[in-house]
Image: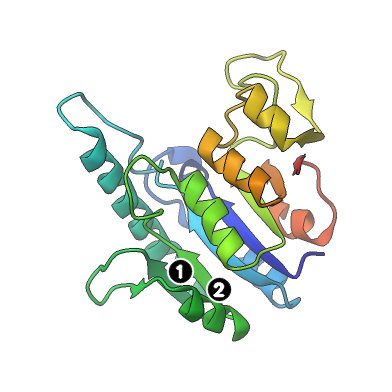
Amino acid sequence: MHKAILLKLSGEALAGKAHTGFDEETVRGVARQVKAVSDKGVRIGIVTGGGNFWRGRSSDAIERTKADQIGMLATVMNCLYVSEVFRSEGMDTRIFTPFSVGGITELYSKDACMDAISKGQVVFFAGGTGHPYFSTDTATVLRAIEMEAEAIYLAKSVDGVYDKDPKENPSAVKYDEIKMEQVVTDRLGVIDLSAAALALDNRMPMYVFGLNEKDGIINSVTGEFTGTRITV
């Protein structure tokens, strides 16, 4: 079992069956699982996507930089909500952003992050990288490297990596294990190319699994993994 992990939560998965906003039952289930893992001594950082609120430009009237900034704020809202649910389940949390959000979050620094993690706090990394043209995938890999995580766990709305989109292709084949080089070469889309290249350069493995699976987080982190391993 890894001693330090970065958990990426899909925004769409947090929305549950509604596909938008929050599904409290889903988020509370995530919180209970994360607490169970944290209670085993695993140090945990979390990045959330923003897809339950915002996915790219809604029209050509919005230019890319502004669209990406809206997406960053969507992840801040997600982290605020998820963090509060975590606290209601008995966890101590901290939320860091790469830009100032008044008194709502803390400005990110590695020293502050590592201090929080050393105290057993669950750390949320909101706001992406703070720059346009970089997705939460890139932020996930970057923060995992900075917090000295041993692996990234990607909790998604699908249960692993497939050779094609399983939602559109019933014949799609799921990989049990795949190399990061193939993710890049075949453009499988599980993470964006810049994030995959950063993970490859820094030898950061990933575990992709379905958030809607029963005890998916607990099982994946403690060894009963049924998703896709991405090796480096």
Residue 31 in view, yes or no: no
Tag 1, which secondary structure? helix
Left or right of 36, for residue 224: right
Q: Position of residue 9 (x, y in %)?
A: 54, 51
Q: Which of 89 and 126 is in front in this view?
A: 126
Q: Which residue is drawn at 48% across and 66% down?
A: 124
Q: Position of residue 55 (x, y in %)?
A: 36, 35
Alpha carbon separation for disc pair 1 and 2: 9 Å
Residue 159 % position (x, y): 69, 37
Q: In which quarter of the image is the C terminus?
A: top right
* SS at mark 2 in the image: strand
Residue found at the very far left of the displayed protein: 61
Q: Residue 83 carries which label?
A: 1
Please identify the quadrant where the N terminus is shown. Answer: bottom right
How crowded is the residue under tag 1: few (<14 C-alpha within 10 Å), some, or many (20+)? many
**Which of pointers 1 and 2 lies earlier in the amino acid sequence?**
1
Which of the two residues, 216 or 23, is positioned nearer the viewer here?
216
> Left or right: 191 with respect to 208?
left
Residue position marked by numbered label 2 in the rendering: 122
